[in-house]
Amino acid sequence: MNGFKSLFASKTFWGTAIAFVALILNATGKVNIDQAMQGQALALVTEIGGVAGSALALYGRVKATKQIG
């Protein structure tokens, strides 16, 4: 790796942040949808968010060319 970049320019940071938010929303029940669909929709959204965030974090780490500083 050569040079530095802002933390907010890091794909790893954003991937981790997306995964973290998805997990927190699921754990705290902050997402409001009607009772009939709540369990299924929340599980699906948070699983997709967790997978997408994790995948972006891994991709960002592999493709990184600069250190965060």
Image (spheres, grey):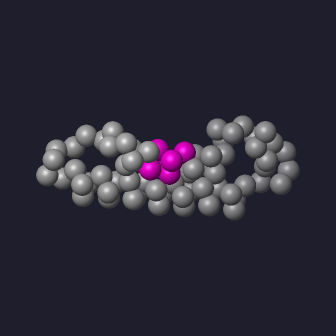
Left/right of residue 53 with respect to residue 64 in the rendered view: left
Left/right of residue 64 with respect to residue 35 in the rendered view: right
Q: Residue at x 38, y 53 (%)?
A: 46
| Residue 58 forms part of the magenta stretch | no
Of 57 and 9, nearer the camera is: 57
Badge count: 0
Question: As drawn, which residue projects farthest toward the right?
Answer: 2
Left/right of residue 69 with respect to residue 16 in the rendered view: right
Q: Is the magenta stretch mostly helix, strand or loop?
A: helix
Residue 30 image position (x, y, % from top left): 33, 39
Q: Is residue 31 above or below residue 38?
A: above
Residue 47 image position (x, y, % from top left): 39, 59
Residue 69 image position (x, y, % from top left): 79, 39
Of 67 and 38, nearer the camera is: 38
Residue 34 image position (x, y, % from top left): 16, 44
Q: Which residue is drawn at 69% across and 62% down?
A: 62
Left/right of residue 9 with respect to residue 51 in the rendered view: right
| Residue 21 forms part of the magenta stretch | yes
Of 5 and 29, nearer the camera is: 29
Q: Which residue is drawn at 34% across and 54% down?
A: 45
Q: Residue at x 14, y 52 (%)?
A: 36
Quadrant (top left/top right/bottom left/bottom right) for the N terminus: bottom right
Question: As drawn, which residue projects farthest toward the front?
Answer: 28
Which stretch is magenta? 17-23
